[in-house]
Image (spheres, rainbow, N blue to C red):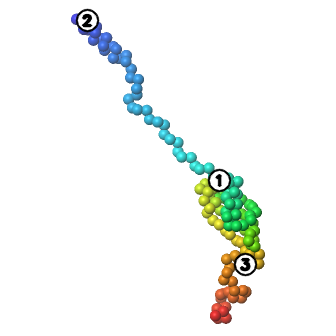
Amino acid sequence: MRLPLLLGSLLLSSGCIVAETRPSHPHRPPPRPPPSRPVAMGYDEAVRRGFDQCRARGYRCDLKEAHLTGNDVWKVKFRVDGRGEKGHLHLDYDAYSRNLIKVNDKVKDKGGRDWDDDDWDGPGRGKKKGHARRDD
């Protein structure tokens, strides 16, 4: 009788000593960090993109100024010269997406006319208030 009691107690005691080495739930990898915000365009990149845009239009470009506004827009301004024309070119770029947002192209030929003024008839030919009877 002692032998079964001794064997039973040995079996029970060994079961108490054995510890589980694996956790009951699988190990989860740490969560991924949130995607980082893209790096904003710097002064040099904004000016380089502006020069590229200006040259693509066929102008000789002189940088007038470039600055970043509070709403993350780079404003790049040039004095331009080319094909007998003079004026300025203002470009707005989104600092993060680097997209060209706005172009203000005020270039005139050296005679003072806009380069796209092909319908100009000379002074006094405009359709202003009071001139309609005389012009027709």
Q: How far separated are the C-alphas under marks 3 and 1?
A: 36 Å
Residue mark closest to the camera, 2 vs 3: 3
Rendering coords of residue 53 (x, y %):
67, 62
Height in image: 132 above or below 32? below
Report which residue position mark 3 lands on.
113
Label drawn at residue 3:
2
Rendering coords of residue 64 (x, y %):
75, 62
- Tell me how many marks there are: 3
Rendering coords of residue 72 (x, y %):
63, 56
- The residue sitting at 58% across, 49% down in the picture is 37
Q: Residues within 10 Å of mark 2 (few under 14, many from 20)?
A: few
Q: Residues within 10 Å of mark 3 (few under 14, many from 20)?
A: few
Residue 21 shows in the view: yes
- The residue sitting at 73% across, 86% down in the picture is 123
Q: Which quarter of the figure has residue 22?
A: top left
- The residue sitting at 71% across, 59% down in the picture is 66
Q: How far separated are the C-alphas under marks 2 and 3?
A: 118 Å
Q: Nearer the viewer, residue 61 or 75?
A: 61
Q: Which one is earlier in the sequence, the residue at label 1 or at label 2?
A: 2
Q: Amino acid at mark 1?
A: Met
Quadrant (top left, top right, bottom left, bottom right) of the N terminus: top left
